[in-house]
Image (tube, rainbow, N blue to C red):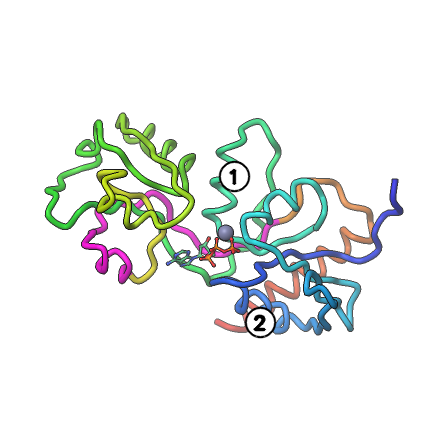
Amino acid sequence: MSAPRDRLRIAVQKSGRLAETSLDLLRRAGLSFRASRDRLFLFGDNLPIDVLLVRDDDIPGLLREGSCELGMVGRNVLDEQSLATPGVVFPKVVSTLGFGRCHLAIAVPQEMPWGSPADLEGLRIATSYPALLAAWLAREGVAAEVVTLNGSVEIAPRLGKADVICDLVSTGATLQANQLREVATVLDSEAVLARTPRALSPLLAELAERLQARIDGALSGAQ
Ligand code: ATP
Ligand code: ZN
């Protein structure tokens, strides 16, 4: 077994919608960094805290296995992965971060009439969030076919792969460009600070508390 770590690790998205704002928040929390050669880490200069730069989808798993103690990730990604693997202990949300706001929504072709979720009965719904969608359909008491796609969900109806979609929406511009309209919300999401479910050494626990407090301080200063 390797020696226990003496530096805290926080995982953030390497590139994408959450990447810049996550790093800005860490800077506002008082951290400064220099990049590693391979661009996997940013090493903290002023505190024993390093940033792990990864795909957002990898963050819940890294927290679960204890490769990092904290992570900034969309609630949509965290909830999808925990619903998809029942019985596994998942990272806990310790703060909501106020950026990366979006919602997972049902969108239908513009000309399709809509009254209620019951109208989805028997239809094919394309999504990258099959577990969140299936849980919502079960709550609504609707039997529909979930078609899992890893990307380009919004073009699935035009390709004949699905009748309607369930996708992340922020401005609605993508839906409009694809002649779709939003009719129901499955989940409201934003970036969250999540913490490993594993027990931490006293040193890492103390560093995690300090960083959480600094992040909360930076967030309340911004309001
Ligand atoms: P990665 O390469 O890290 O896997 P990605 O393509 O999965 O990136 P992004 O598109 O950068 O992810 O989105 C990251 C997160 O940003 C989403 O999981 C969601 O929480 C949030 N988000 C906010 N608005 C939107 C939007 N309009 N569409 C998609 N995600 C959004
Ligand atoms: Zn991703």
Q: Secondary structure at mark 1?
A: helix
Q: Position of residue 115 (x, y in %)?
A: 13, 39
Circle 2 residues within 10 Å: few <14, some 14–19, many ≥20: few
The image quadrant where one finds the N terminus is: top right
Q: Position of residue 136 (x, y in %)?
A: 34, 35
Nearest the eye: 120 or 193: 120
Q: Are marks 2 and 1 in contact (CB under 8 Å)?
A: no
User: Mark 2 against mark 1, which lies toward the viewer?
Assistant: 1
Q: Is residue 181 magenta?
A: yes
Q: Position of residue 118 (x, y in %)?
A: 19, 31
> Label for residue 24?
2
Q: Relative to 92, say whether 6 is above or below.
A: below
Whole-number angstrom distance, CA of label 2 to CA of label 1:
26 Å
Assess mark 1: CB under 8 A from ligand 2? no
Residue positioned 65% across, 46% down in the render: 62
Query: Which of the two labelled residues, at mark 2 and mark 1, occupies the earlier sequence position?
Result: 2
Extent of the magenta region: 172-194
Q: Relative to 196, say whether 87 is above or below.
A: above
Residue type, numbered disc 1: Gln
Residue type, numbered disc 2: Asp
Please give the residue where the numbered disc 1 appears in the rendered image: 81
Q: Is residue 155 magenta?
A: no
